Image: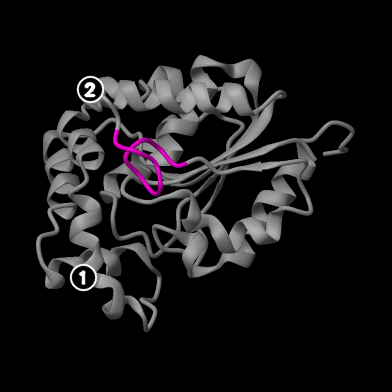
Amino acid sequence: MPTLVLLHGIGSAGVAFGSVVTRLQRDFRRVVVPDYPGHGFSEEPTGRFTPDALFESVSKVIDELVDEPAFVVGNSLGGALSMHYAITQPERVRGLVLFSPAGAQSTDDEWNQIRRVFEVTDRARSLEFLNRLYHRTPWFVPLVAHELPGTLRRRAVCELLETATNEHVPTSEALAAIQAPMLFVWGRSEKLLPAGHLDYFRKNLPAHAEVEQPVGFGHCPHFDAPGQVARRIVRFARAHSPGSIS
């Protein structure tokens, strides 16, 4: 099948998709998993790092690395980036798969709620944050919780959170007008994004979007159930690849 692009969440990195990538490589021509500036192994960005700067950076990477319309998969912030790419460069997107995407128009209270979640200053707050990512928190989380404050204090992460507003997410009209095939997945154990965001998406997704709410999926289902995530991506991509019969 054509190229697949995987876009991670804020403060995360491409390596977070490792268990999914190993299951997808045999089914796609290529699997592209970039780290954003100031995330993972990437250097910090030059200048102030706003959502617009991130959109530009990610779009440039996809355009440079991918030579055909691709399937774009995004989790959390990566979902918002995926929608933005489909809106601005529709001819470059064969289909979208969104897992608990950010990118909903939000109230001031919802923006403040999100920013508070990312105010991780000690081990207790780290554990609280990490528990929000999973359907069922794995045994090793307490062993790595001490690393999280440093990760979320990286300049790129802080500046994105400080500068993000409704101006940086799709309008309801732009969201509804996305033409690419879309699979929208919001797990029943979502605990990081405001509950109102699911209502917003249900109201404003394009009519052709497939919507699923699986049991056992938290905010990062590629951690909870990588096999199920990979199967959903492959099934969707096969249905919307050249020569497929849907």
Read off the residue under disc 2.
47
Give the structural element (helix, strand or loop) at label 2: loop
* The quarter of the displayed image where residue 238 is located: top right
In space, the residues marked 1 and 2 are separated at their CA atoms by 29 Å
Which residue occupies 49% across, 23% down?
59
Q: Residues within 10 Å of mark 2 (few under 14, many from 20)?
A: few
Mainly helix, strand or loop, the magenta region? loop
Q: How many marks?
A: 2
Residue 89 pos. (x, y %): 56, 16
Residue 14 pos. (x, y %): 48, 49
Q: Give the vertical position of 58 relative to 136 (above or below).
A: above
Which residue occupies 65% across, 16% down?
91
Tell me the quarter of the image containing the N terminus.
top right
Which residue occupies 28% across, 30% down?
105
The type of residue carrying mark 2 is Gly
Read off the residue under disc 1.
146
The type of residue carrying mark 1 is His
* The quarter of the displayed image where residue 51 is located: top left
Q: Nearer the viewer, residue 203 or 23?
A: 23
Q: Give the vertical position of 39 relative to 125 (above or below).
A: above
Q: Earlier in the sequence, mark 1 or mark 2?
A: 2
Start-end of magenta stretch: 35-44
Q: Check if residue 37 falls in the magenta segment.
A: yes
